[in-house]
Image (spheres, rainbow, N blue to C red):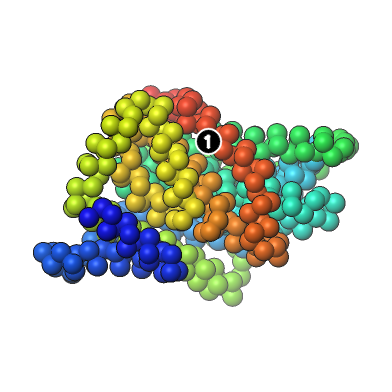
Amino acid sequence: MSAGILGILAAALLVGTPIFVALALTVFVLLGWQASVPLPVVPQRMFAGIDNFTLMSIPLFILAAELMRIGGLAERLVDLARVLVGWFPGGMAFAAVLACVFFASVSGSSPATLAAIGTIMIPAMLAAGYDKRFTVGLVTTAGSLGIVIPPSITLIIYGAVTGTSIGRLFAAGILPGILLGGMLAAYCYIHARRTGMAFALPPAWRECWQALRRAAWGLGLPVVLLGGIYSGIFTPTESAAIACVYGLMVGVIVYRQIGLTDLGSILRNAGLLSATLLLITAGASAFSWLLASQGIPARLAAEVLTLSDSRFGLLLLFNLVLLVAGCFLDGASAVIILAPLMEPIARSVGVDPVHFGIVTLINVEIGMLTPPVGLNLFVACHISGLPITSVARAVLPSLGVLLLGLVLITYVPWISMVIPGLIYG
């Protein structure tokens, strides 16, 4: 039965079937073959999978990110990043990484971060004389930080399917996101020194203050969201609604870059992306139910524990599985299908569910940079005009940086757990 389930799913994906259809089709075929479970159960399970209060935050955070992108926040964050670090050797590359970190803290989405920052920084870095391969690879990789730094849509999905606290997951993602951003900045510095780049004159304090003042409204959003969540004023789902109101207010009243004519396209784009994610979530939920109904998670746990019952070995095995799955599944599908299978096994050997959620997230982040379905690769193709094979080769050096970060975060749980421990005790 396990082989049949995986065989049908793999065949559907190999012929180019959309992921949502492939997942639902697998469930329909297996239930139709068994003839013991009525087929109307499938849409019922799909609806039950998205009938979740926590998942309401996904379309709201997507809408907030779109409002921030159209509302002019990205340009102001880029200007601030340039002022703060642009005078270092390789300063434009530093600024690209820092701008991605800034925008990630308000978007929760990797493609949104890459689209917002990449459209500004890739042309600017090329105009400044940076190598195109280095530029595209760096910005594509830095854009993937959008799903690590809270508020992260992928962490919300992980919390929903495993029952892990969203607040703790958000807190756990802060330091790993900063660590990965710092490692990419170190990579930029090494590249700058190798290519002979020198320090430039630092900006005047007045210029720094002006850039900070222009970007202050954007930087204030993560403070409002995370502060409200951890103080108990509102839940993560309610924070998503507040982010939408905040983004609309900033774009319409403060920055004055969103007009009535823009709202239609903003709602349409956010609605299309939200529908895509929720359809995948519905299909993956039905698929997960099928696996559970066949007793596959229990058998898988028993088989895995016969291979290794050590924390080190299991985390290595799970990382390898998640990295391979990331090549063929989008982030939401990988989390919904694999997290409910792996998290109980990891917990049985003493791995904290919050820590395992961050490990899963970093693997998903890397999967967004690997062909054939790495979403960030396609976004970078659209921005840079390069074919996907060239973009995939361009990300390899910075992808190595993320893999090193994955090892550190996997085997040093303190990186993920220190902030949740300080906040929640």
Quadrant of the rendered structure where residue 283 is? bottom left
Is residue 370 among the parts visible in the rendering?
A: yes
Name which residue lies at 80% across and 38% down.
Answer: 192
Q: Secondary structure at mark 1?
A: helix
Q: Quadrant of the N terminus?
A: bottom left
Q: Nearer the viewer, residue 334 or 228?
A: 334
Alpha-carbon neighbours of circle 1 within 10 Å: few (<14), some, or many (≥20)?
Answer: many
Q: Residue 110, image x and y in percent?
A: 55, 52
Is residue 204 among the parts visible in the rendering?
A: no
Q: Quick check: 72 above or below 395?
A: below
Q: Looking at the picture, which amino acid does disc 1 mark?
A: Leu
Left or right of 247 on screen, residue 309: left
Q: Which residue is mark 1?
A: 406
Q: Quick check: 131 above or below 359?
A: below
Q: Residue 398, image x and y in percent?
A: 65, 43
Q: Quadrant of the C terminus?
A: top left
User: Among all residues in the image, which is located at the extreme left?
Assistant: 36
Q: Nearer the viewer, residue 111 or 230?
A: 111
Name which residue lies at 62% across and 38% down.
Answer: 401
Name which residue lies at 43% across and 69% down.
Answer: 15
Left or right of 256 on screen, residue 208: right
Q: Residue 64, image x and y in percent?
A: 51, 57
Name which residue lies at 45% across and 69% down.
Answer: 16
Please count the marks in the image: 1
